[in-house]
């Protein structure tokens, strides 16, 4: 089989190297920007890739929603299998792209888009075939975890921890997509849509970590709690709720000990009970590992995922996520997360949700 890689940055370069170890696949093209076409296999016109009938798999390692979404769509329309690490593009076109892959009889795989190397999508799909999953939650952004971890461990200010994360290469020069919670939002929508077998609401409460300061972390520590940025999704009967927010969790919870830029994702099945997966949620090599595992699924037809149709139509009910909410210094017991997150936003105050798994 022949592959083409779109984007030759951190992930694209690692994928290129790791694919050299896979028998039966060769990289025919790399899509690069026009001023960086250094190798014979590099092209800047994506149509060269989409119209080459010998390209079987298109690997998307581009940043942001556009033009990645349009390229994925075009590749599927041209009958190519697609593997993507780009959660923004996959989340944006989730239902449409899955449907298109199904119509064209080609695979659309995106394990690397959620939790880097952690095989979370594979496990959710495997367990979810028989079992009813009613909860998905976890630490899904390594940059935010690194910042909160540094602030908590070394009693650092937010700005200090952010610049340390940037120096360590964990945070981008423009860290907004990470620290605003938007990156986690994309991931929790993808994961819970698969877990609950439904295409879910995209307009969900999303609170980042910009308003968390070291005094707040200290206050929760003195009560035996740690603040982590969590993506949370629950399903009950025919209703569900999703949110992203800083969450206070007991020091004894496994998530409380997740260090540096690691991720931990949990889901709960009716029969399986709780399953937790832990690992490198980012980095070129760990992400490439997940991309190449998806490529191997297509190569070995094991079992290639030909898009997805979402059978269930549960109703969005944000009131399902309720508990004790902290808006600035005020505590609101048994309150709806989305209402309190909105209140915090309007008042320009910090927001923390007490999360009990
Ligand atoms: N890095 C990680 O740890 C990680 C983990 C999981 C998922 N992901 C996802 O994987 C994707 C790639 O991430 P990355 O870290 O590899 O990003 P990156 O280092 O910024 O690489 C992306 C590359 O694509 C280039 N590019 C941008 N627009 C292009 C276009 N239209 N045509 C051709 N090339 C273009 C960029 O060039 P310029 O930089 O010059 O613009 C850059 O070289 C993203 O969607 C990211 O969210 C990354």
Image (spheres, rainbow, N blue to C red):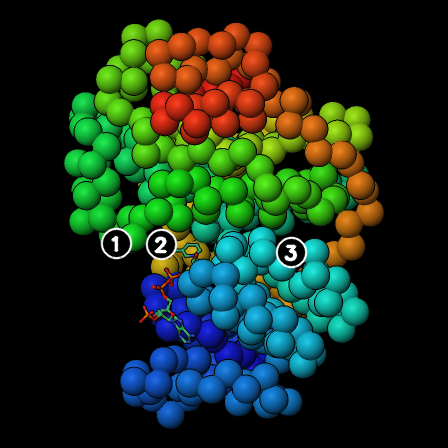
- Residue located at (66% from left, 22% from top): 320
| Residue 124 visible in this rendered orientation of the protein | no
| Residue 232 visible in this rendered orientation of the protein | yes
Q: Earlier in the sequence, mark 3 or mark 2?
A: 3
Which mark is drawn over residue 173?
Answer: 1
Split into quadrants, the picture shows ligand 1 in the one at bottom left
- Residue located at (43% from left, 15% from top): 326
Q: Mark 2 = which residue?
A: 283
> Under tag 1, what secondary structure?
loop
Which mark is drawn over residue 4?
Answer: none
Residue 188 appears in which quarter of the rendering? top right
- Residue located at (54% from left, 17% from top): 356
Q: Earlier in the sequence, mark 1 or mark 3?
A: 3
Instruction: Calculate the distance from the C-alpha at mark 1 to the C-alpha at mark 3.
Output: 28 Å
Q: Mark 3 = which residue?
A: 94
- Residue located at (52% from left, 54% from top): 87
Q: Residues within 10 Å of mark 2 (few under 14, many from 20)?
A: some
């Amino acid at each position: 089989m022949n592959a083409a890689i779109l984007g030759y940055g951190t992930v694209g370069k690692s994928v290129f190297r790791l694919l050299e170890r896979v028998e039966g696949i060769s990289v025919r093209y790399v899509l690069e920007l026009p001023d960086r076409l250094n190798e014979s296999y590099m092209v800047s016109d994506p149509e060269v890739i989409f119209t080459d009938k010998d390209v079987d798999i298109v690997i998307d390692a581009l940043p942001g929603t556009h033009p990645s979404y349009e390229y994925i769509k075009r590749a599927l329309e041209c009958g190519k299998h697609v593997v993507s690490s780009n959660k923004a593009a996959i989340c944006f076109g989730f239902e449409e792209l899955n449907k298109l892959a199904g119509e064209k009889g080609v695979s659309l795989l995106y394990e690397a888009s959620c939790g880097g190397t952690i095989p979370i999508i594979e496990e959710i799909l495997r367990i979810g075939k028989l079992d009813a999953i009613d909860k998905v939650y976890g630490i899904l952004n390594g940059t935010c975890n690194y910042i909160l971890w540094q602030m908590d461990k070394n009693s650092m200010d937010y700005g200090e921890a952010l610049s340390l994360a940037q120096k360590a290469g964990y945070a981008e020069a423009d860290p907004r997509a990470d620290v605003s919670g938007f990156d986690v939002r994309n991931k929790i929508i993808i994961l819970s849509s698969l877990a609950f077998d439904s295409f879910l609401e995209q307009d969900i409460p999303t609170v980042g970590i910009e308003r968390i300061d070291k005094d707040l972390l200290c206050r929760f520590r003195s009560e035996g709690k740690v603040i982590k940025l969590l993506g949370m999704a629950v399903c009950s009967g025919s209703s569900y709720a999703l949110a992203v927010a800083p969450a206070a969790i007991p020091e004894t919870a496994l998530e409380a000990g997740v260090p540096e830029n690691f991720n931990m994702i949990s889901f709960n099945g009716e029969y399986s009970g709780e399953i937790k997966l832990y690992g490198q949620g980012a980095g070129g090599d760990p992400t490439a590992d997940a991309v190449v595992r998806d490529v191997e699924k297509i190569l070995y037809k094991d079992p290639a995922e030909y898009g997805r149709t979402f059978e269930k139509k549960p109703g969005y009910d944000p009131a399902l996520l309720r508990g004790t909410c902290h808006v600035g210094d005020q505590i609101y017991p048994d309150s709806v997360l989305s209402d309190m997150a909105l209140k915090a936003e309007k008042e320009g105050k910090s927001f923390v949700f007490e999360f009990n798994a």
